[in-house]
Image: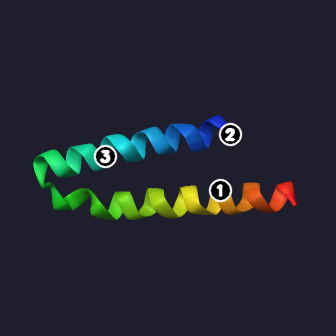
Amino acid sequence: MSQNVLEKEAHLKELVVKLLEEKNLKDFELLDSLFDEIKEELQYHQKSLN
């Protein structure tokens, strides 16, 4: 897995913890965006393995 995906995963985890601690709803759009980016990269990585 590329470093970029690992960095996004770490950022995603930090954001989830922050949202849970602060109950801050304004960052959910960013959260959705990060999930989409990671999902696309993982799908691309999976296709490149086949």
Answer with mark 1 or mark 2, whichever residue precedes in sequence.
2
The location of residue 9, given as percent across then percent down, is: 48, 44
Report the disc number at residue 2: 2
* Residue named by callout 1: 41
Q: In the picture, which quadrant includes the C terminus?
A: bottom right
Q: State yes or no: discs 2 and 3 in contact (Cβ < 8 Å).
A: no
Farthest-out residue, right: 50
> Residue, x 18% and y 61% (percent of image)?
25
Q: In the picture, which quadrant includes the N terminus?
A: top right
**3D distance between C-alphas at marks 1 and 2:** 9 Å
**3D distance between C-alphas at marks 3 and 1:** 19 Å
Side of 23 relative to 43 (left or right): left
* Residue named by callout 3: 15
> Residue, x 30% and y 49% (percent of image)?
16
**3D distance between C-alphas at marks 2 and 3:** 20 Å
Side of 26 relative to 40 (left or right): left
The location of residue 42, given as percent across then percent down, is: 65, 56
The location of residue 27, given as percent across then percent down, is: 26, 57
Q: Is residue 39 above or below residue 1?
A: below
Q: Give, as a three-letter code, the residue at label 2.
A: Ser
Quarter where residue 41 is shown? bottom right
Q: Give, as a three-letter code, the residue at label 1.
A: Glu
> Residue, x 22% and y 44% (percent of image)?
18
| SS class, disc 3 | helix
